[in-house]
Image (spheres, rainbow, N blue to C red):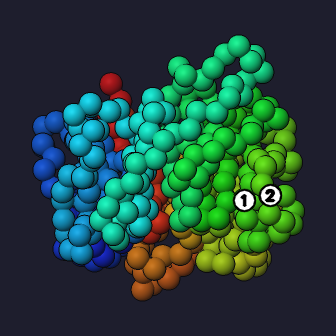
Amino acid sequence: MELYVTGSNIFRQWHCDDLVINEFRVLSPSKHIVANDRSRTNLLEINWSYNIVQIDDILYISGAWDGKENQFTKVPLPSECVTSKVDLCVTGNDYKIILVDKKMAALWALDLNKNEVKKLNFFIEKAIEDNMKKKKLDDSVTKAVLSSGTCLYLTQRGHVYSGILPSYVDTKHCVGKVIDVQCGHEHFVLLTEEGRVYTWGNGRRLQLGHGDISSLEVPTEVEALAGIKILKISAGGWHNLALSEFGDVYAWGLNDTGQLGIKHLNREHNESFCVPNLVSLFDKQGIEITRNVKDIACGSKHSALILDDNTVWTSGCNKYGQLGLSEQKYPSLNYYKNVFQCDNEDRNCSLICGPWNTVIFCKFEK
């Protein structure tokens, strides 16, 4: 596997000399990667000041740590996690790292400012399935995502919990089992196996997609996507992308730096959208691209797409070169531009964005 990286390297989290990486480069997420055994290294989390990397069963922080830059050190796991070999989900932001026992017994919040750890019980509520005979004692956490203020947890059974101290989110009204959750800065998105999209949280920047700026406490279906089977969702700071089964992309929310990438004929502007709008892509001659999109990702104020020909397209804020372009020539893009091509067709490419980075994962097809 190869990683192509562009964007912020302010805290030397990518272990190269440039503070701003303004083109996609093959970089290692680890100082200690073994050249002939890359499969044992996995990039789990990209934040502003550090990344979380897993090598075999060990978690590392790469970047800023304990007031110093250019660090590569083990995540300070609580002793009980080490001695009991607890299977963990990990997520973080620039203030906390959350370690969750996948068996839902407990979680640990590492305060990065105070350099202290707090253990919390993962409260097991009363049975919440329609069949009340079943308990969720055999459930397990499969994903944890941390926003600037709270955390979402998704379980193998499709249950959702919210908050650093988890509380159950009622999703019984959602059509289909929940298969993914995403956090923006102030809002949340979930996807069900039926391809339905639901949002809740703060809507003041149109990020909920319901046509207004109302805030919602309960996951509510995005009606503009009803009837369209969505395969993947991604949440940025205050915007979202959704990828349909037909390779179409829909975008909505704040568009102050062009992060939605929606281009109008004969005019360029940064209009925000309160409901999902179909994204169209155009080549240098202004001709619409008809290829399908196969992956999507959102940063804080930018977005990235990969098409089925392994071309990469980006739009939005480019302050730290996260679009894969010169930040001086292109401070931002109002609509998607083809910025990179994974030349080898025998590679399976996918995307992940940090707040100010874009990373392409390229795996060789067997």
Residue 326: % across, % down: 40, 78
The relative height of residue 86 versus residue 342 in the rendered view (above or below) is above
As drawn, the residue found furthest toward the bottom would be: 328
Asked whether residue 90 appears in the rendered view, the answer is no
As drawn, the residue found furthest toward the top would be 133
Q: Residue 265 carries which label?
A: none
Question: What number is the disc on residue 216?
Answer: 2
Quick one: label 1, few (<14), some, or many (20+) residues within 10 Å? Answer: many
Please name whichever residue, 10 or 312, is drawn nearer the observer in this view of the structure.
10
Q: Position of residue 141 (x, y in %)?
A: 50, 34
Identify the residue shown where x is 61% and y is 77%: 257
Task: Count neighbours of disc 2 (C-alpha within 10 A) and say few if under 14, some if 14 to 19, many if 20 or more.
Answer: some
Q: Position of residue 323 (x, y in %)?
A: 46, 68
The residue located at (53%, 75%) in the rendering is 317
Residue 22 visible in the picture:
yes
Q: Are marks 2 and 1 in contact (CB under 8 Å)?
A: yes
Q: Which quadrant of the structure image shows residue 177?
A: top right
Measured Cα–Cα span from mark 2 to mark 1: 5 Å
Q: Mark 1 points at which residue?
A: 201
Q: Say which label, 2 or 1, has the lower sequence index.
A: 1
Give the amino acid type for the residue marked by disc 2 in the picture.
Leu
